[in-house]
Each structure stands twice: as C-alpha cells, then as structure tokens.
Image (cartoon, grey):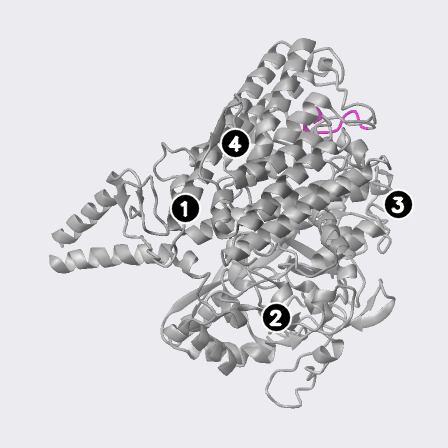
Amino acid sequence: MKTHFLIIIAASLFLFSCKKEGCTNPEATNYNAEADKDDGSCVVDESDPYASQKQQVKQTYADQAFAVYSDAYDLAVILQNSISTFVSNPTQVNFDNAKQAWLDSREVYGQSEIFRFVDGPIDNPADGPEGLINAWPMDEAYVDYVDGNATAGIINNLTTYPTITESALVSANEFGGETNVSLGFHAIEFLLWGQDLSASSAGTRPYTDFVVGGTADNQARRGEYINICADLLVQALEQVKDEWDPAGSSNYRNTWLSLDNTLALRKMFNSIRVMAGFELSGERMYTAYDNMDQEDEHSCFSDNTHRDIALNAQGIENLYLGSYTDKDGIAISGYSLSTLVSLLDAAKNTEMVNKLADAKNKIALMYTPFDQAIILPAERPKVLDAINALVEEEGIIIDIAGVFGITF
Amino acid sequence: MRNNILIALLSLAAILIACKKEVSEYYSSSYSEILPAGENCTVFDQSSLAFSYRISGMSSTQNLEFFVGNSFFNQNWVESPSSTTARDGLGPLFNTKSCSSCHFRDGRGAPLSGEGILLRLSVPGGGIDPTYGGQFQDHAISTASSEGDVSITYSEIGGMYPDGTTYSLRHPNYAMINLNYGALDPSVLVSPRVGSQMIGLGLLETIDASDIIAQEDVADADGDGISGKANYILDPYYGVTMLGRFGWKSNTATLHTQVAAAFNGDIGIKTSLFSSENHTSNQSGLDLLADGGTIEITDEDLEKVVLYCQSLGVPARRNSSAYDVQKGSNIFKSLNCHKCHTESYVTGNSGNIEPLKNVRIYPYTDLLVHDMGPDLADNRPDGLADGNEWRTPPLWGIGLIQTVNNHTFLLHDGRARSIEESILWHGGEAETSKNAFKQLPANERALLLAFLNSL
C-alpha cells in the first residue's frame, strides 16, 4: 500500500515539477520546441517531409499571437488610464485623448481577430472572453440615454442599479441569457462618442455628459460605468495574452505547440477561411451593404468601421505571411505559412499573395466613412468589389488546404 | 514494486492516449461512411463551431445572403428607439434577445431562463391564455414588466438496470411565479420547450411529404407497438394545411413560419406574417410603448434568416468505422430504435436551394409524433398531436452537442442530462425498446452510446 502512495507522489512530482511538457522529438509531427520534458506523446510520421516546416509555422503563429495580444493589452491599459484621467478631470482635451486612445487600441485589436475561430484563448467555449471584448451591436438604450428616451439605461436607472459596480455590470451583461452588449470596446465607444445621428460626422456626445452638473443626467455614474468597462477590457485582454505568453508553462501556447501539425494547419486555414469568407466579407460588410442601414456597422458611433475592415484583412495577411508590425512599428516575422505553401504549390501561393494585396487595395479604395460607402450609389460597387476579393481569398485558401489533404 | 510502476505508467499512457483522441478522429473513418448529408451539405469541422457552417454549392448571392441571415440570427435585438434601426423593436415582452441565445453557436438551448427554454400556454379546447397569451415571456424591455419568472425545480427519481447498475433521472417541476399581469387561467396547460440544434433543417424541409406520411401507422396495423402520426397544420405563409415537420410536436410545416413565429413569440419582433406584438389586450399599457415600426424585420431580411436556417450544414460523423461504433449501430437496429429514428432518405426537389435537392441524408428521424408515455407527457395538445405525443427528434449532430454547447441536456425540456438518460425517459411506444436497452449488458449499452455519439 505504501508503495502505491510513493508511486502516486512520484507521478505527481513528475507531472508538476517539470516546467513544460510536450513532445521533445524534433522529428515528430507534434514536436513542441519549447517543451523541456518529453511527455511520451510524440507522433512520428516519417512520410511527411515537411514536418519541420509545419512545426516552424506553428511556432510563428504562437509568437505572433503573443505579440499582437501583448500590444492589444498594452494599448488597452493606455485606454484605461486615459479614461480614468478624463473621468477624474473631465475636460475636452482629456475627452479627446480618451477617444484617441480608443482609436489607437482598435488598430491592434482588429489585427488580433484572426486568432479567433480555432477554439483558442480568445473564444473557446469555456471561458473565451471575446463576447466581453468586442460584441456588437451595442444595446444603447440598455446602457444610457438615447435620442427619444432621456432616462434609458443602467446609468439612469437608480432603482435597479443603485450603485454602478463591476459585479452589477457583469451580471447585467449576462442578464437575458446571451450577452447583452453593455460592456467591451463598443460600450466604451458609445460612452465616448454617443449615438451617430448625422450622415456627415461620428457621434457628438459632449464631454460635459461626464461633468457633474453638465449635460444629461447621472454624470458621475456615467464616469463610473466607463471606468469599469475599461477595467474589464484590460482584464479580458490580459487573460488572453497570458495564455500565449512564452513564460507560462501550462497555458494555451503549450497546447498549441503540441498540436498535431495537420490539425494546427487546419485551424489556421480555417481561421482565414472564416475571417475572409464569413465574418468580414459576410457579417461585417455584406450585411451592412445589403441593409444600407447607416448604423448597421461595426464601429457605428465613432465611424471607424473602415479601419476595423482594413485591420481584419491585415490580420489575415499577417497570419499568412507570418509577419506582424507591432505598435511601435517594429516588424516581427517568422517562418510563414506562405513559405510552406510555396514548397508544395508555388502557383497557389502566388495566387494567394496576389489576392491578399488585391483585397487590401480594394478595401483601401472604399469610401470613408463606411456608413456612407454602403449608401452612396456611386460608392456601393467598391464595397462589393472588396467583398468579392475577400470571398476569392476564401476560395483560394480552401484550395490550398486541399493541397494538404484538409477538407472543410 | 515493479507492478506498481507498470500500473502507474499504464495509467499515464492511458491519459496521454485519451488526450490525443481528438487528433486521430480526423483520419479514422473512410470517406463514404462519414457523410450524413452528402458532399455539399456535410461539414468537416469538429470544433465548437461545428454547427455553424454554410453548405456548399449555393449561388453566390445565396452565399452572401446567408451572412445577412446569420447576423440577424446571432445578434441581439435592441430596444427602440436606437440608432441601429434595422435591429430595434425588441419586446416589449420577450424570452430572449436573439435567436442565438437559445440556439447558441447554432446549437442547443439549456433549460435555464433566457438560454433556451420557454413555456407554451393554452387552455383546454385549443385557445390561448386570455391574459398571458400563447407563450410565457419572462423578460421585458426596461419600460415594461415581464410576465413573471419561471421556476424550474427537479426531483431525482432513482432507477436500476437489471444488472444492478443504478441511475437517477431528474423530474422537472415548472411554476410561473411573481406574475405581473394577474392570474393565469385556472385551467392553463403548459408545455416547456428548449431550442434544438439548427443543422440540416433545409434538408428536412426538402424531404418529400409522401416519404414521411408513408411511415404513418396511426392504428398500429403492423402490431409492432409503434404507431407514428403525422401532424397537419395550417401554415400561415402558404395559407394551406401542410404536413408539420418542425417544433417539438411537428406543429410547424415550414421554416419560414417557424422563424417568423420565433421572432414574434420569443423576441417580440413583428413580421408581415405575425404583425401583432406577442402580448394580449388584457395586458394594459404595453401597446403604448415605442416599437420598431409596424414591421420590425422586413420580408427581405426575414427571407435571409430563413435561408440561413435552411443552409446550415451537418457535421461529418466521427469514428464511424470504429469497431465499437459499428457494433453500436447493430444494437440500435436490434432495439428497433430505427423504427422511429428513421436512418435515411433521399431529399426531394422542392425549393430554390439547389444543393439541398436529391441528397442522400442520414437524419435518424421520421418527423412523426409518437406517444412517449405519461412520464414525458406535457398533457397539452398541439394540432393533431395529443398531450402524450412528441416528434421524433433528428439524431444527427447529437454527439457534438457537448463540444458546441458545453452540455448534453436532451429531450423537449432538457431534463435528460445525457444520451443515456434520454433513452431511459422513453416510454409509451418506445417502452419496449427502452426496456430492451436496460436488459443489455453494460458493455453493449456503452456500444450503443458510442454509436450515438458518432452521429
């Protein structure tokens, strides 16, 4: 009996003492270059001459994910500080600084969205915080006053929400089953810009909505609300960033690097397919194009949707080309999916590289702001051109996946 | 000592092998065996998004319109007035704010308020509750009161297999409490329903009615104890009486009507088909509240949501050629499960979505209603279906519900916590099959479950 315990203790030590577990055989399809203790999981497929290149592509993906989420986190912290400064000292200058910090933070977050759709840290079903970060459309009247209803929203509801606290907002966000979109980037956007009620400009909420005795009611509560939104955003991005941190030992990065090569490739191709052909061209662009509704767009309060679109497309390119230019302008690159594809089918790789450039070009040609691009008759065809370029990207990536024996 | 080491190593190995299962599943089956919906309508993703993919082979316009439907399906409706005028008009009474909250990731709802369960109401003779209407809405916009709260409590009922293995089933009790609009009709009949997975619905709609009706045996002429009855219903979209296929009692004939009815009853969105809000004239004040217009989703957008619901693909099977699964498949037939859970059809030629036509599909349903016994009965008639009858639900995708929705709550109200429990709840026409299942040795019960999980 005693020996049983010893074995169990020994086994536990074995499991807990090592820093990172994984397959340490570089020949294996699930080789984890960062593992320093072999866990016996190695799968060697001697028939795959590209195993090592695939391994490097996985590594690049993990490095890029950490780089982009680190930037997203850092910029969210700057946003949090700007908002906090504004709320404690609500001036026009501080208001404008907070808005700029929001726009800056979107420049990186938009590029991070390519890391969705693989059941990774951002949107895995168990605890992925994507819905708390970037959900839309904002339920405006659930949060604050709207045109036609000066007393709407949690901010103005002192009966149900006598105090604005983090826990009250989190449970309000969950009320009604799925996410009531009352938190995240777009809640902050709504509180900074307000409803966009004109064709020619973004929302024009006055900064005095946050000045006690200024415009609208419950200014202090509005300040508490936006501060909490920023705090929660930072927490959510920290959670995702940590999962990709090379310094972590049992985080998702380790899981990712230990994935079977083909499964990892499948996930990467699928992300591109879903982002290009589904999320971006379909949900975010064609839906708005089809509805021609001024505010049926992603960043409707700030009129920043054109950047969301360009950045999502940039994310696809980053993943495929294995490079990312960080918030300080430094390029980070590694062995790319593109290089791997070129080894198997150089023509298809060229086709994809060209199509990425084509889509980027067509997106840049769209009229700004996007809510007018979908309405002005002379501008609408350009939106459709960009949509079609993204749909073509999807088609090419499906073909490329086929080269690796991957079907969707 | 050596033995102990061996045991420790073996268990470690077992853990490691178990963890790698996901990987091997992609390669284990031969191609033809894993397609429940043909080349175009089968999808190969096995992640939490497995129920969310569009079928292939539609026109390029349909491909794009799918996403418009998708966005109206997924995103929350908001209170009026709002700057997103295309998406306002929620309530004033509602169960939830979006289709996707009860069909999360196009999957299955859970028996929790706002996440997938609702209560249908009627009075004997077929009318609706004079105050609360045909459905109990336990949420409301900020300027109105909800109808009240739904209380769900469970009592555990123990049972035992003949081999001595024990199990426990949870029996639900529903109550509508904290009522805000006075008393319910004293004779009110209540039927709880959870949202089902959305996969392959267009294929089910494309099965020729004659292929479904041919399976009817209302008077059990063949004496096998299984009858099967078609429910017929006046479809407001086509204006004629049609075979019911959708809903827990096959009480809806077309996806168009199903979608429009759900918008109205569950979210409070008016359509040209259901152009009144979901409250009654006995609920004072609600008519005075701001709304999103006389129609809150246009016909064009509604059509796109219908297209979306018609064109979600069916996930490929996993491990279908594995020994356990093949054995389980034989047991499925030997227990006569397939007499209601009809394995296969070739779809017909109706509709305007080409890839749905003439496809060999494996949905495992007859779409008929069956007496499922007193324990499952809601005692509330619905069309031709009586209070004991329920539609045979399709089984395709059942093994991925855990992956997609993080739960395995099954049956019409999610009372079963696993596939095994859902089998044990079967009664009435399925009593004999259920008892035969219970008679099986434990390893054969496991084989059947392995088969069902491969679907």
C-alpha gap between disc 3 and disc 2: 39 Å
Q: Please, what secondary structure does the residue beneath circle 1 have?
A: helix
Q: Which residues are magenta?
A: A149-157
Q: Mark 4 = which residue?
A: A324
Q: Mark 2 = which residue?
A: B363
Is residue B175 visible to the viewer in this orientation of the structure?
Answer: yes
Q: Same chain for the residues at labels 4 and 1, yes or no?
A: yes
Q: Nearer the viewer, mark 4 or mark 3?
A: 4
Viewer-nearest residue: A76 or B258:
A76
C-alpha gap between disc 2 and disc 4: 45 Å
Is B342 placed above or below B258 here?
below
Residue B125, position as x, y percentages in the image: 80, 68
Q: Mark 1 = which residue?
A: A53
Q: Please, what secondary structure does the residue beneath circle 4 have?
A: strand
| Principal secondary structure, stretch drawn in magenta | loop
Q: Say which quarter of the image contains residue A130.
A: top right
Report the amino acid beneath label 4: Tyr
C-alpha gap between disc 3 and disc 1: 59 Å
Q: Nearer the viewer, mark 3 or mark 1?
A: 1
Q: Residue at x 80, y 72 (%)?
A: B242
